[in-house]
Image (cartoon, rainbow, N blue to C red):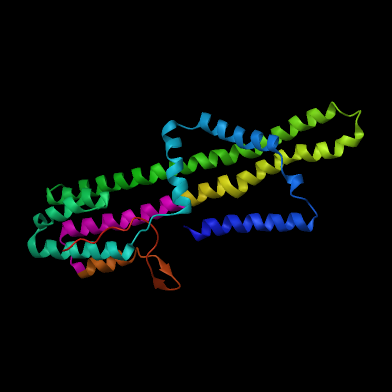
Amino acid sequence: MDLATIGGLLFAIIAIAVGAYLEHVTLDSLLGISAFLIVVGGSIGATIVSSAVEDLKQVPRVLKMAFSPPKRDYQGMIDLLVGLAEKARRNGLLSLQEDAEHAENPVVQRGLTMAVDGADPEQVVAVMRAMSEQQADEIIRGAAVFDTAGGYAPTLGIMGTVMGLITIMGRLSEPDTLGPAIAVAFLATLYGLGSANLFFLPMGYKIKAIAKQLTHFNEMIIVGIEGIQAGENPRNLREKLSIYLPSTGGRRAAVTEGAPVREGA
C-alpha cells in the first residue's frame, strides 16, 4: 500500500470533517443520494462517452498502481546490467543469449536479444525507447480518464444545484421548506467540487507521476544496454547508471515498482 495515497485521502477527509464539526454541520445534512447520483453517475457517464474503450480498460490497473505501486529496484537493476557488461567483455555478446531469454523485464529482454543478434546500436535504442514510451503511454491514458472525470464533476455539481433550485422555485408558496431545500440543492455542488479535488484530479496526478518514474527507470535500462553493446567498461557503466538512483536524505535508495530478478553474470 502507498502510504502517501492512503494518508493524503484520510487527512483530507478528516480535515473536512473537523471543519464541518467546528461549524456545527451535522453528518445528515451532508448526505444526499440524489445529489450523489447526479454528480458521480453523471461524471462517470460523461467520462465513458468521451474516453476510448482502450483507455477505460486501463482504469482498474492504474487505480491499483495508485494505491499499491509495484516495486522498482534501481540498485538491483544496476547490479544486473553491470554484471551483464562484465560477462559480455569477458566472453562476448553472444554469451548473453541465455540471459536475454530469461530476463523478466521486457525492455531488458528486447534490448539484450537485439544486441546479441547483432542489431545496429541505434536501432536497439530506438526499439527500447519505443517500448518505454508505450508502457508509459498506457498508464498516462488511464490517468487521463481521471482527469476527464475531474473536469466533469464540478459542472455536474452545478447542474444538480440548478435542478434543485428549479424545484425550489416551484415551492415558493411554502416558505418553511425553502431553507432545507436550498441546502440540499447545494449538496450537488459540494459533491462535484469534493469528488474532483479530493479524488479524481489527485488520482490523475498520482498516476502520471508513476508513469514518469517508469520512464526514468526504463531510461536507465536503455543506457545500460547501450553500454553493454558498446563494450563499455563495467566500472564506468556503474558510475553512469548510478546517476539514475533516486536520492532520499542525501542517500541513494531504491523506489517503488517492478523489481527485476537478478540474473547470474
Q: Based on the displayed image, in which of its 4 quarters is residue 73 positioned?
A: bottom left
Q: Which residues are magenta?
A: 209-234
Front-most of 47 and 134? Answer: 47
Q: Residue furthest bottom?
A: 250
Q: Position of residue 45 (x, y in %)?
A: 56, 31
Front-most of 157 and 130? Answer: 157
Residue visible at 56% across and 59% down in the picture: 7
Residue visible at 24% across and 49% down in the picture: 125
Q: Position of residue 229 (x, y in %)?
A: 17, 56
Residue 25 visible in rendering = yes
Residue visible at 71% across and 39% down in the picture: 32
Residue 208 visible in rendering = no
Determine whether, in the image, residue 82 is placed left or right of residue 243. Answer: left
Determine whether, in the image, residue 152 is placed left or right of residue 215. Answer: right
Compared to residue 198, the image places residue 162 above or below, namely: above
Q: Is residue 217 magenta?
A: yes
Q: Position of residue 50 (x, y in %)?
A: 52, 30
Determine whether, in the image, residue 117 is placed left or right of residue 189. Answer: left
Residue visible at 86% across and 35% down in the picture: 178
- Quarter of the image with the C terminus is bottom left
Q: Position of residue 207 (x, y in %)?
A: 47, 49
- SS majority, magenta: helix
Q: Residue furthest front?
A: 28
Compared to residue 243, the image places residue 134 above or below, namely: above
Compared to residue 160, the image places residue 77 above or below, namely: below
